[in-house]
Image (tube, rainbow, N blue to C red):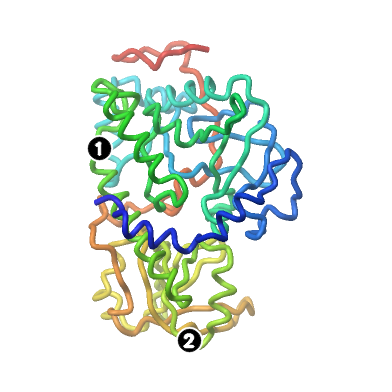
Amino acid sequence: MPLSAGLRALALGMLGMSTLGMLACANLQTGFDRQTLDDPEAGLVLGVFPLSKNAIVDGDTVKVDGLDASLRLLAIDTEETFKGDKAWRAYEVGWEAYLVNEQAKTSRPIKVATPLGMDAKYWAQDFFKGVNKVRLERDHPKEIRGRFNRFLTYVFVERDGEWINYNVECVRAGMSPYFTKYGYSRRFHEEFVAAQDEARAAKRGIWADDAMAYRDYDLRLIWWYGRGDFIAEFEADAALDPSLISLTNWDSLDRLEDRLGDEVEVLATIGDIRQGARGPKRVLLSRRLGSDFPLIFWEEEVFEQSGIQRYRGEFVRVRGVVTSYTDSRSGRRQLQIEVRDPAQIRLPTYVPPGDPEDFQEDDLEWGAQDKQPAAPPPDDFAPLDPPPHERR
């Protein structure tokens, strides 16, 4: 079920009045100091930035100038655009057969090019038409960059003296669901819920009866709400207990270092699971790429009884003592938690869709890689169903 009002209130307690103060004091000038971009004390507003040339890659990919990394737009996930001949040729068999063929490749919900993905790009181009600059804001002062180093942001456009949240309007237009797979919006949850309800009632975009879009959004929403509830429950608990640490926070490793030898509880997504020829099984909890946090399972029975392998790509809670070791080959010191009791692992109550063997790196952060622009269909393109409307 979606996040309850009481649980949401507790989760938001960690922001408190300090967040309101940061918003009130945030510098909204067009200038910015590059040194503050990774500084949580800078507040929730990153700054105002010029749009790049050809800024709109697709419905959830917008480029700006002046940053050292790209953006990951929060709480939205538009469908993919067709990026080359191969994608268009796959669609040539007709919409229904195309969906069947793509779903046959995986047991998990698909993320592929669709006509609605093209529509989302066109809609975004219209939304940003005539816009030269945008304001970027964070959802939380400690949630700065994602796994692939991208800035986690809402994008605002100024119209008639008011800053309009593109992320929310994308959902209102039916170009994206309210995407809670990586957590509910802490600042705009009610706005996203209302926008999605409005879009569904009006049957806009992905919610239209005849939409050439994914058919399983009801399933996806149940899954995503389960993840959102799991994250929100942890954040509510963490607001009352500093030994609870989310590995998505920028300062998580520093906090774990400070608690070396003490018991903590961490929240993270399960990434790679490794078993060498000798030694323990290592389950990597995902952080910034290249700095994952290992769980060490010395006994296969403990690993199996924990059930953790069924939840690859999902958020889990792990309790244990922070220890460290030094890699004999690299000389690098690594923090870790040893799991000697299955009870140290707390799994979500929902069962994620699909086979965990179909897990991919992209499951750890949506839209993991920088996207390529959409491509026009081949000159001899001859689909059984009409292609997406080519307006440009």
Q: Residue at x 42, y 73 (%)?
A: 240
Numbered disc total: 2
Local crowd size for mark 1, using a 10 Å CA cut-off: few (<14), some (14–19), many (≥20)? few
Q: Nearer the viewer, residue 382 or 269?
A: 269
Callout 2 amino acid: Asp
**Tag 1 residue:** 216
Q: Which mark is residue 120?
A: none
Asked if disc 1 and disc 2 are in contact, CB closer than 8 Å, the reply is no
The numbered mark, 1 or 2, whose residue comes first in the sequence reads: 1
Give the left or right position of residue 215, taking residue 151 as reference. Answer: left
Q: Residue at x 37, y 50 (%)?
A: 181
Answer above or below: position of 10 versus 304.
above
Residue at the extreme bottom? 261
At mark 2, the secondary structure is loop
Residue 231: % across, % down: 37, 60
Q: Is residue 276 visible?
A: no
Callout 1 amino acid: Asp
Q: Nearer the viewer, residue 22 or 113?
A: 22
Q: Residue at x 50, y 61 (%)?
A: 16
Q: Nearer the viewer, residue 332 or 21?
A: 21
**Tag 2 residue:** 262
Q: Is residue 166 visible?
A: yes
Give the left or right position of residue 96, taking residue 64 as reference. Answer: left
Q: Nearer the viewer, residue 358 or 253?
A: 253
Residue 46: % across, % down: 65, 47
Quadrant in which residue 62 is drawn: top right
